[in-house]
Image: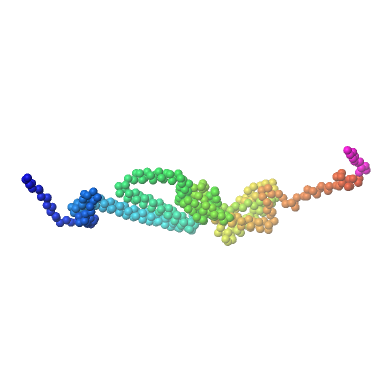
Amino acid sequence: MTSQTLPAPPVRTVQHLEVPAVSSLPVVLMAAGASSSPSPSPSGTAPAVPTLQDAQESATNAASWVEQNWSTWLAMGLQILLIIVVAVALRSVVRRAITKLIERMARTAQAVDGTALGGLLVNAERRRQRSAAIGSVLRSVASFLILGTAALMVLSTFKINLAPLLASAGVAGVAIGFGARNLVTDFLSGVFMILEDQYGVGDVIDAGVATGEVIEVGLRVTKLRGAEGEIWYVRNGEVKRIGNLSQGWATAGVDVTVRASEDLDKVKATLDEVAEKTSKEEPWNELLWGPIEVLGLDSVLIDSMVVRVSAKTMPGKSVTVERELRWRIKRAFDAAHIRIVGGATAVEDVEDLPDPTAAVAAPSAFSNSDSPQSMATTPITTQRTVPPRK
Protein backbone atom coordinates (compact mmCIF):
# COMPACT_ATOMS: atom_id res chain seq x y z
CA MET A 1 0.00 0.00 0.00
CA THR A 2 1.13 3.41 -0.77
CA SER A 3 0.57 5.92 1.90
CA GLN A 4 -1.15 9.08 0.77
CA THR A 5 -0.21 12.27 2.38
CA LEU A 6 -3.27 14.07 3.79
CA PRO A 7 -3.48 17.80 3.21
CA ALA A 8 -2.71 19.85 6.24
CA PRO A 9 -5.57 21.93 7.65
CA PRO A 10 -5.43 25.58 6.84
CA VAL A 11 -3.70 27.64 9.41
CA ARG A 12 -5.88 30.38 10.73
CA THR A 13 -4.07 33.50 11.66
CA VAL A 14 -5.44 35.03 14.76
CA GLN A 15 -5.58 38.74 14.38
CA HIS A 16 -6.12 41.36 16.99
CA LEU A 17 -9.89 41.86 17.14
CA GLU A 18 -11.61 44.90 18.46
CA VAL A 19 -15.06 44.35 19.92
CA PRO A 20 -17.15 47.23 18.51
CA ALA A 21 -20.09 46.81 20.81
CA VAL A 22 -20.52 45.81 24.39
CA SER A 23 -23.49 43.66 23.43
CA SER A 24 -21.13 41.06 21.81
CA LEU A 25 -19.29 40.38 25.09
CA PRO A 26 -21.88 37.87 26.39
CA VAL A 27 -21.63 35.97 23.13
CA VAL A 28 -17.84 35.69 23.46
CA LEU A 29 -18.12 34.57 27.07
CA MET A 30 -20.70 31.99 26.17
CA ALA A 31 -18.48 30.68 23.39
CA ALA A 32 -15.49 30.44 25.71
CA GLY A 33 -17.52 28.64 28.37
CA ALA A 34 -18.89 26.24 25.85
CA SER A 35 -15.43 25.39 24.51
CA SER A 36 -13.94 24.82 27.94
CA SER A 37 -16.65 22.55 29.27
CA PRO A 38 -18.68 21.00 26.51
CA SER A 39 -21.77 19.18 27.58
CA PRO A 40 -22.52 15.91 25.88
CA SER A 41 -25.69 15.81 23.90
CA PRO A 42 -28.19 12.99 24.28
CA SER A 43 -27.68 11.80 20.72
CA GLY A 44 -23.96 11.57 21.14
CA THR A 45 -23.12 14.29 18.59
CA ALA A 46 -21.26 17.40 19.76
CA PRO A 47 -23.36 20.65 19.57
CA ALA A 48 -22.29 23.51 17.39
CA VAL A 49 -20.10 25.73 19.50
CA PRO A 50 -20.00 29.43 18.49
CA THR A 51 -16.49 30.52 17.97
CA LEU A 52 -14.80 33.85 18.41
CA GLN A 53 -15.15 34.47 14.70
CA ASP A 54 -18.94 34.05 14.92
CA ALA A 55 -19.09 36.56 17.74
CA GLN A 56 -17.01 38.94 15.66
CA GLU A 57 -19.37 38.57 12.72
CA SER A 58 -22.43 39.19 14.92
CA ALA A 59 -20.87 42.30 16.39
CA THR A 60 -19.87 43.50 12.94
CA ASN A 61 -23.41 43.03 11.63
CA ALA A 62 -24.90 44.90 14.60
CA ALA A 63 -22.46 47.75 14.17
CA SER A 64 -23.13 47.99 10.45
CA TRP A 65 -26.91 48.01 11.06
CA VAL A 66 -26.58 50.77 13.59
CA GLU A 67 -24.29 52.69 11.25
CA GLN A 68 -26.80 52.40 8.43
CA ASN A 69 -29.85 53.51 10.51
CA TRP A 70 -28.46 56.04 12.95
CA SER A 71 -29.03 58.89 10.53
CA THR A 72 -32.71 57.91 10.17
CA TRP A 73 -33.15 57.73 13.91
CA LEU A 74 -31.48 61.07 14.38
CA ALA A 75 -33.68 62.65 11.74
CA MET A 76 -36.82 61.21 13.32
CA GLY A 77 -35.78 62.40 16.78
CA LEU A 78 -35.03 65.90 15.55
CA GLN A 79 -38.35 66.00 13.68
CA ILE A 80 -40.32 64.91 16.75
CA LEU A 81 -38.45 67.43 18.89
CA LEU A 82 -39.17 70.17 16.39
CA ILE A 83 -42.89 69.27 16.31
CA ILE A 84 -43.13 69.35 20.12
CA VAL A 85 -41.26 72.66 20.40
CA VAL A 86 -43.38 74.31 17.71
CA ALA A 87 -46.64 73.00 19.26
CA VAL A 88 -45.72 74.22 22.76
CA ALA A 89 -44.60 77.60 21.46
CA LEU A 90 -47.70 78.03 19.27
CA ARG A 91 -49.97 77.04 22.17
CA SER A 92 -48.30 79.57 24.45
CA VAL A 93 -48.57 82.34 21.86
CA VAL A 94 -52.25 81.61 21.12
CA ARG A 95 -53.19 81.46 24.81
CA ARG A 96 -51.34 84.73 25.47
CA ALA A 97 -53.10 86.38 22.53
CA ILE A 98 -56.51 85.22 23.79
CA THR A 99 -55.72 86.56 27.26
CA LYS A 100 -54.68 89.93 25.84
CA LEU A 101 -57.85 90.09 23.75
CA ILE A 102 -60.05 89.35 26.77
CA GLU A 103 -58.25 91.99 28.85
CA ARG A 104 -58.72 94.56 26.08
CA MET A 105 -62.43 93.76 25.94
CA ALA A 106 -62.66 94.26 29.71
CA ARG A 107 -60.83 97.62 29.51
CA THR A 108 -63.13 98.78 26.72
CA ALA A 109 -66.17 97.89 28.81
CA GLN A 110 -64.74 99.73 31.83
CA ALA A 111 -64.25 102.86 29.72
CA VAL A 112 -67.99 102.95 29.04
CA ASP A 113 -68.85 103.08 32.76
CA GLY A 114 -70.23 106.39 33.89
CA THR A 115 -71.75 107.27 30.52
CA ALA A 116 -75.34 107.08 29.34
CA LEU A 117 -74.57 103.85 27.50
CA GLY A 118 -72.91 102.35 30.52
CA GLY A 119 -76.14 102.54 32.48
CA LEU A 120 -77.80 100.22 30.02
CA LEU A 121 -75.02 97.64 30.21
CA VAL A 122 -74.41 95.04 32.86
CA ASN A 123 -72.20 95.69 35.84
CA ALA A 124 -68.42 95.27 35.95
CA GLU A 125 -68.53 91.96 37.85
CA ARG A 126 -70.85 90.47 35.26
CA ARG A 127 -68.52 91.56 32.43
CA ARG A 128 -65.52 90.13 34.26
CA GLN A 129 -67.23 86.76 34.70
CA ARG A 130 -68.30 86.68 31.07
CA SER A 131 -64.79 87.54 29.88
CA ALA A 132 -63.28 84.85 32.09
CA ALA A 133 -65.73 82.25 30.77
CA ILE A 134 -65.10 83.17 27.13
CA GLY A 135 -61.33 83.14 27.66
CA SER A 136 -61.44 79.74 29.33
CA VAL A 137 -63.46 78.22 26.50
CA LEU A 138 -61.24 79.70 23.78
CA ARG A 139 -58.03 78.62 25.49
CA SER A 140 -59.33 75.07 25.96
CA VAL A 141 -60.36 74.79 22.30
CA ALA A 142 -57.03 76.19 21.10
CA SER A 143 -55.02 73.79 23.28
CA PHE A 144 -57.05 70.80 22.10
CA LEU A 145 -56.60 71.63 18.43
CA ILE A 146 -52.87 72.39 18.63
CA LEU A 147 -51.88 69.44 20.82
CA GLY A 148 -54.11 67.03 18.89
CA THR A 149 -52.55 68.07 15.59
CA ALA A 150 -49.05 67.71 17.08
CA ALA A 151 -49.85 64.20 18.32
CA LEU A 152 -51.00 63.13 14.84
CA MET A 153 -47.84 64.56 13.28
CA VAL A 154 -45.67 62.65 15.77
CA LEU A 155 -47.47 59.40 14.90
CA SER A 156 -46.95 60.05 11.19
CA THR A 157 -43.21 60.51 11.86
CA PHE A 158 -43.04 56.90 13.05
CA LYS A 159 -44.42 55.81 9.66
CA ILE A 160 -47.76 54.89 11.19
CA ASN A 161 -50.67 54.86 8.75
CA LEU A 162 -53.17 57.33 10.15
CA ALA A 163 -55.97 56.52 7.71
CA PRO A 164 -57.38 53.58 9.76
CA LEU A 165 -56.97 55.57 12.95
CA LEU A 166 -58.82 58.56 11.56
CA ALA A 167 -61.50 56.33 10.08
CA SER A 168 -61.98 54.56 13.40
CA ALA A 169 -62.10 57.90 15.21
CA GLY A 170 -64.70 59.11 12.73
CA VAL A 171 -66.90 56.05 13.23
CA ALA A 172 -66.49 56.26 17.01
CA GLY A 173 -67.33 59.96 16.90
CA VAL A 174 -70.50 59.29 14.94
CA ALA A 175 -71.52 56.55 17.39
CA ILE A 176 -70.81 58.75 20.39
CA GLY A 177 -72.63 61.62 18.72
CA PHE A 178 -75.75 59.51 18.25
CA GLY A 179 -75.54 58.14 21.78
CA ALA A 180 -74.80 61.46 23.46
CA ARG A 181 -76.61 63.87 21.14
CA ASN A 182 -78.34 65.56 24.09
CA LEU A 183 -74.98 66.14 25.76
CA VAL A 184 -73.54 67.60 22.56
CA THR A 185 -76.61 69.81 22.14
CA ASP A 186 -76.32 71.08 25.72
CA PHE A 187 -72.60 71.78 25.28
CA LEU A 188 -72.99 73.70 22.02
CA SER A 189 -75.95 75.67 23.39
CA GLY A 190 -73.91 76.60 26.47
CA VAL A 191 -70.99 77.79 24.34
CA PHE A 192 -73.21 80.04 22.23
CA MET A 193 -75.05 81.36 25.29
CA ILE A 194 -71.75 82.44 26.83
CA LEU A 195 -70.33 83.87 23.61
CA GLU A 196 -73.52 85.80 22.82
CA ASP A 197 -73.90 86.99 26.43
CA GLN A 198 -77.54 86.01 26.63
CA TYR A 199 -77.42 86.04 30.44
CA GLY A 200 -74.91 85.92 33.26
CA VAL A 201 -74.59 85.33 36.98
CA GLY A 202 -76.94 87.61 38.89
CA ASP A 203 -79.48 88.08 36.09
CA VAL A 204 -83.14 87.28 36.59
CA ILE A 205 -84.30 85.31 33.57
CA ASP A 206 -87.38 83.52 32.32
CA ALA A 207 -86.12 80.36 30.62
CA GLY A 208 -89.56 78.97 29.85
CA VAL A 209 -89.10 75.82 31.92
CA ALA A 210 -88.03 77.82 35.00
CA THR A 211 -87.73 81.40 36.21
CA GLY A 212 -85.31 82.81 38.73
CA GLU A 213 -81.93 84.38 39.41
CA VAL A 214 -78.91 82.88 37.67
CA ILE A 215 -76.40 81.66 40.26
CA GLU A 216 -74.17 79.58 37.96
CA VAL A 217 -73.65 79.33 34.21
CA GLY A 218 -72.06 76.17 32.82
CA LEU A 219 -71.47 74.73 29.40
CA ARG A 220 -74.11 72.04 30.01
CA VAL A 221 -76.38 73.21 32.85
CA THR A 222 -77.58 76.60 34.09
CA LYS A 223 -78.46 76.86 37.79
CA LEU A 224 -81.33 79.18 38.80
CA ARG A 225 -82.61 80.32 42.20
CA GLY A 226 -86.41 80.53 42.19
CA ALA A 227 -88.63 83.02 43.98
CA GLU A 228 -89.32 80.54 46.80
CA GLY A 229 -85.63 79.73 47.27
CA GLU A 230 -85.65 76.53 45.22
CA ILE A 231 -82.76 75.76 42.85
CA TRP A 232 -83.53 74.82 39.26
CA TYR A 233 -81.03 72.92 37.10
CA VAL A 234 -81.89 73.74 33.50
CA ARG A 235 -80.14 71.97 30.63
CA ASN A 236 -78.95 74.47 28.06
CA GLY A 237 -80.23 72.34 25.19
CA GLU A 238 -83.81 72.50 26.55
CA VAL A 239 -83.96 76.30 26.63
CA LYS A 240 -85.89 77.50 23.59
CA ARG A 241 -86.22 81.15 24.63
CA ILE A 242 -84.63 83.44 27.20
CA GLY A 243 -86.31 86.46 28.78
CA ASN A 244 -83.64 88.50 30.56
CA LEU A 245 -85.21 90.76 33.15
CA SER A 246 -81.92 92.32 34.27
CA GLN A 247 -80.53 93.91 31.12
CA GLY A 248 -81.25 97.51 30.15
CA TRP A 249 -84.17 98.75 32.24
CA ALA A 250 -87.48 97.50 33.66
CA THR A 251 -90.99 98.95 33.78
CA ALA A 252 -93.10 99.29 36.92
CA GLY A 253 -96.83 99.44 36.20
CA VAL A 254 -99.63 99.97 38.74
CA ASP A 255 -103.35 99.80 37.90
CA VAL A 256 -105.62 101.78 40.24
CA THR A 257 -109.33 100.87 40.12
CA VAL A 258 -111.74 103.53 41.40
CA ARG A 259 -115.49 104.06 41.19
CA ALA A 260 -116.90 105.43 37.98
CA SER A 261 -118.39 108.38 39.86
CA GLU A 262 -115.02 109.73 41.04
CA ASP A 263 -113.66 113.01 39.74
CA LEU A 264 -110.92 112.27 37.21
CA ASP A 265 -109.16 115.59 37.74
CA LYS A 266 -108.95 114.94 41.46
CA VAL A 267 -107.67 111.41 40.87
CA LYS A 268 -104.99 112.62 38.45
CA ALA A 269 -103.88 115.45 40.75
CA THR A 270 -103.49 113.01 43.65
CA LEU A 271 -101.47 110.58 41.53
CA ASP A 272 -99.23 113.40 40.25
CA GLU A 273 -98.52 114.48 43.81
CA VAL A 274 -97.57 110.93 44.80
CA ALA A 275 -95.32 110.59 41.73
CA GLU A 276 -93.50 113.86 42.37
CA LYS A 277 -92.93 113.13 46.04
CA THR A 278 -91.66 109.61 45.34
CA SER A 279 -89.24 110.78 42.67
CA LYS A 280 -87.51 113.17 45.11
CA GLU A 281 -87.06 110.84 48.06
CA GLU A 282 -84.24 108.37 48.61
CA PRO A 283 -83.65 105.60 47.71
CA TRP A 284 -86.46 105.73 45.15
CA ASN A 285 -84.82 108.52 43.17
CA GLU A 286 -81.93 106.12 42.43
CA LEU A 287 -84.18 103.21 41.51
CA LEU A 288 -86.28 105.34 39.17
CA TRP A 289 -84.63 105.90 35.79
CA GLY A 290 -87.44 108.07 34.51
CA PRO A 291 -90.41 110.13 35.74
CA ILE A 292 -93.50 108.42 37.10
CA GLU A 293 -96.20 108.98 34.49
CA VAL A 294 -99.98 108.83 34.82
CA LEU A 295 -100.86 107.23 31.51
CA GLY A 296 -104.62 107.80 31.88
CA LEU A 297 -107.65 105.54 31.79
CA ASP A 298 -106.78 101.98 30.91
CA SER A 299 -110.40 100.78 30.92
CA VAL A 300 -113.84 102.16 31.75
CA LEU A 301 -116.73 99.94 32.90
CA ILE A 302 -120.25 100.64 34.12
CA ASP A 303 -119.37 100.79 37.80
CA SER A 304 -115.56 101.27 37.81
CA MET A 305 -112.61 102.67 35.90
CA VAL A 306 -108.90 101.79 35.87
CA VAL A 307 -106.13 104.42 35.88
CA ARG A 308 -102.65 103.19 34.94
CA VAL A 309 -99.40 104.54 36.42
CA SER A 310 -96.03 103.59 34.91
CA ALA A 311 -92.33 104.28 35.57
CA LYS A 312 -88.98 103.17 34.15
CA THR A 313 -86.82 101.59 36.86
CA MET A 314 -83.47 99.94 37.43
CA PRO A 315 -83.31 96.32 36.18
CA GLY A 316 -84.79 93.90 38.68
CA LYS A 317 -86.35 96.66 40.84
CA SER A 318 -89.73 96.99 39.15
CA VAL A 319 -91.57 94.88 41.74
CA THR A 320 -90.09 96.91 44.61
CA VAL A 321 -91.17 100.20 43.01
CA GLU A 322 -94.65 98.84 42.29
CA ARG A 323 -95.18 97.89 45.92
CA GLU A 324 -94.06 101.29 47.14
CA LEU A 325 -96.32 103.06 44.65
CA ARG A 326 -99.35 101.03 45.74
CA TRP A 327 -98.60 101.85 49.37
CA ARG A 328 -98.32 105.58 48.72
CA ILE A 329 -101.33 105.73 46.37
CA LYS A 330 -103.56 104.00 48.92
CA ARG A 331 -102.58 106.42 51.68
CA ALA A 332 -103.01 109.44 49.38
CA PHE A 333 -106.45 108.27 48.22
CA ASP A 334 -107.58 107.70 51.79
CA ALA A 335 -106.52 111.26 52.67
CA ALA A 336 -108.34 112.62 49.59
CA HIS A 337 -111.47 110.49 50.28
CA ILE A 338 -111.17 108.60 47.00
CA ARG A 339 -112.54 105.09 47.14
CA ILE A 340 -110.48 102.23 45.65
CA VAL A 341 -112.76 99.38 44.64
CA GLY A 342 -112.08 95.72 43.99
CA GLY A 343 -111.42 94.80 40.38
CA ALA A 344 -112.76 95.16 36.90
CA THR A 345 -116.20 93.87 37.99
CA ALA A 346 -116.41 95.97 41.13
CA VAL A 347 -119.78 96.51 42.83
CA GLU A 348 -120.92 99.34 45.04
CA ASP A 349 -120.61 99.06 48.77
CA VAL A 350 -123.43 97.20 50.47
CA GLU A 351 -124.19 100.12 52.74
CA ASP A 352 -124.97 102.37 49.77
CA LEU A 353 -127.58 100.01 48.30
CA PRO A 354 -131.21 99.84 49.61
CA ASP A 355 -132.29 96.77 51.52
CA PRO A 356 -134.28 94.62 49.05
CA THR A 357 -136.27 92.99 51.90
CA ALA A 358 -137.44 96.29 53.41
CA ALA A 359 -140.60 96.44 51.26
CA VAL A 360 -141.49 92.77 51.77
CA ALA A 361 -143.90 91.88 54.63
CA ALA A 362 -143.09 89.18 57.11
CA PRO A 363 -144.64 85.79 56.39
CA SER A 364 -148.07 85.25 58.10
CA ALA A 365 -148.88 82.25 60.27
CA PHE A 366 -152.22 81.90 58.49
CA SER A 367 -150.50 81.08 55.19
CA ASN A 368 -149.86 77.58 56.53
CA SER A 369 -153.08 75.53 56.74
CA ASP A 370 -151.59 73.16 59.32
CA SER A 371 -150.57 75.88 61.76
CA PRO A 372 -152.50 76.19 65.08
CA GLN A 373 -153.74 79.65 64.11
CA SER A 374 -155.26 78.35 60.88
CA MET A 375 -156.84 75.35 62.65
CA ALA A 376 -158.40 77.61 65.29
CA THR A 377 -160.10 79.81 62.72
CA THR A 378 -161.55 76.88 60.74
CA PRO A 379 -165.36 76.53 61.61
CA ILE A 380 -165.80 72.88 60.60
CA THR A 381 -163.24 70.27 61.38
CA THR A 382 -162.85 67.70 58.65
CA GLN A 383 -163.73 64.18 59.85
CA ARG A 384 -161.14 61.62 59.10
CA THR A 385 -162.38 58.21 58.04
CA VAL A 386 -160.64 55.24 59.62
CA PRO A 387 -160.32 52.29 57.26
CA PRO A 388 -161.94 49.04 58.53
CA ARG A 389 -159.70 46.41 59.99
CA LYS A 390 -159.43 43.10 58.23
**Which residue reaches farthest front?**
1
- Closer to the camera in the image, 235 or 302: 235
- Closer to the camera in the image, 305 or 221: 221
Q: Position of residue 200 (x, y in %)?
A: 49, 54
Q: Position of residue 248 (x, y in %)?
A: 52, 53
What residue do we see at 34% from left, 50% from top? 151
Q: Is residue 32 magenta?
A: no
What residue do we see at 70% from left, 48% from top? 303
What residue do we see at 19% from left, 53% from top? 51
Question: Which residue range is magenta in the image?
Answer: 378-390
Q: Position of residue 25 (x, y in %)?
A: 22, 56
Q: Where the C terminus falls, by quadrant?
A: top right
**Which residue reaches farthest bottom?**
282
What residue do we see at 75% from left, 52% from top? 351
**Which residue reaches farthest right?**
379
Q: Is residue 354 left or right of residue 266?
A: right
- Closer to the camera in the image, 350 or 277: 350
**Type of secondary structure dominating the magenta stretch:** loop
- Residue 60 visible within the image: no
Q: How many marks are shown on the rendered structure?
A: 0
Q: Is residue 54 left or right of residue 169?
A: left
Q: Where the N terminus falls, by quadrant?
A: top left
Q: Is residue 21 left or right of residue 381?
A: left
